[in-house]
Amino acid sequence: MTTDTAIVSLRPLRLVEILDQGFRLYRRNFLKFTAIVAAPMIPTMLLVLAPMVLFAPFLLQDQLDEWGFQIPTSLGFFSFLTGTGLTILTSAIGGTVLQSLAPAAIARAVTDAYFGGATSIASTYRKLKPHLLRLFGAVGLLLVLILGLSLASSALSSIVPCIPLLLMPVQYGVMIFIQGLILPLVPPVVTLERQGVWPAIRRAWELARRRFWRMFGFMAILYVLNMVIAVGPFLLILIGLQLVTASLTEILNAGLLPILAAAITILATMLLQLFYMSFQWTSITLMYFDLRVRSEGLDLALQADATETVNPNEVLAQAPPVEKTSLITWKEVGYLAIICIGMFALYLIPMILAIGIAILVLSIS
């Protein structure tokens, strides 16, 4: 697609059209986009897998004793605690890198491909260098906020047992606000608009809040697609893994099976997510374009400059300043309330059905 063609075709799109264009763009650049995502994903997964070696002295202690390797119990327990701590640390670091670097690289590559610019894996990541610190800072700040909400909910639940039933819908509602609406737009905002840490978060929120339910519906569709395309096959792999490990209990040491199962699970997750996330982040970048077209006339700005030799990247970087409005309005509090009620219904209805079925079965018997 040439630059002129992309500018002409850049217009307000329906959600189905965004997904269609995202799939077409992903299919045309399949190997390139997959490699761009694989570049940070594979080292990240290896980083998460590495500390699992430290679990071996604890899980294989009986087998090592049979082989004549006497490992003190305290050393095995220490290796287990160290492995657990390093796994948490590497997962946090890897999650931040993966949630920031891969989406930003895809946003850069999609922009270059969409507007007819030359793009490669090396050039894509080279263009990200000036934005890395701001990118990690903005994404890391949002992830810390999400983690803080989870820890606060856990702490309250340990004090008052009934708190989880009341707080879980609110917690998930707020996390949908942050993780489903703001976080996906932060990488393209930092990369394409060259925004700072807090300005990027505010800017992403401003874009999402202008078309709140549209953005919410779009992310819900991507979530369902993720369930069908990535999570569904993963569950089948997990069931198969359970059957295989059950048959291997007589061949392999029982302590080795959890390590093997965890390693296979992580590798299967990586492969499935590698293909799906490339498509998802491609579609989110196109959604970012659509939000700017609808709320800021991005298509008109590009068409106005199309007669001149203007780089579309410069036009994309000319974002209007963030309006000095409150971080959240009462109207948006109402949106949050609706989401929380919906989450409460999704959380409570299955529980009520399960209790009803159990009562019915007991009454029949």
Image (tube, rainbow, N blue to C red):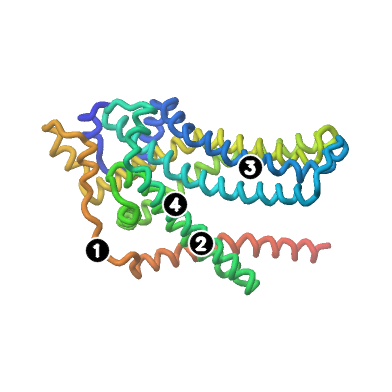
> What residue does disc 3 label?
51
Element under disc 2 = helix
State the separation of the CA atoms marked 1 and 2.
Answer: 27 Å
Tag 1's secondary structure? loop
- Mark 4 or 3: in front is 3
Residue at (25% x, 57% y) in the render: 322
| Image side of residue 154 versus residue 258, left or right | left
Quadrant of the rendering where the N terminus is positioned: top left
Quarter of the image holding residue 287? top left
Q: Report the residue that reaches farthest toward the left.
A: 307
Look at the image and tell me whether residue 229 can be seen: no
Which amino acid, by three-letter code, is at mark 3? Pro
Q: Residue 206: horizontal and vertical position, in percent? A: 30, 56
- Earlier-in-chain disc, 2 versus 4: 4
Tell me where residue 249 appears, x and y as whole percent: 82, 37
**First reached walking from the N terminus: tag 1 or tag 3:** 3
| First of labels 4, 3 by sequence position | 3
Which residue is tagged 4? Answer: 140
Q: Which residue is drawn at 69% across and 61% down?
A: 354
The residue where tag 2 is placed is 148
CA–CA distance in space, label 1 to label 3? 46 Å
Horizontal side of 299 relative to 21 (left or right) equals left
Within-10-Å neighbours for mark 1: few <14, some 14–19, many 20+: few
Asked whether, in this view, residue 235 is left or right of residue 56, the answer is left
Q: Residue 324 carries which label?
A: 1
Tell me whether circle 4 and circle 3 mark residues in contact (CB < 8 Å): no
Tell me the CA gap for discs 4 and 1: 24 Å
Nearer to us: label 4 or label 1: 4
Circle 4 sits in a helix, a strand or a loop, which is it? helix
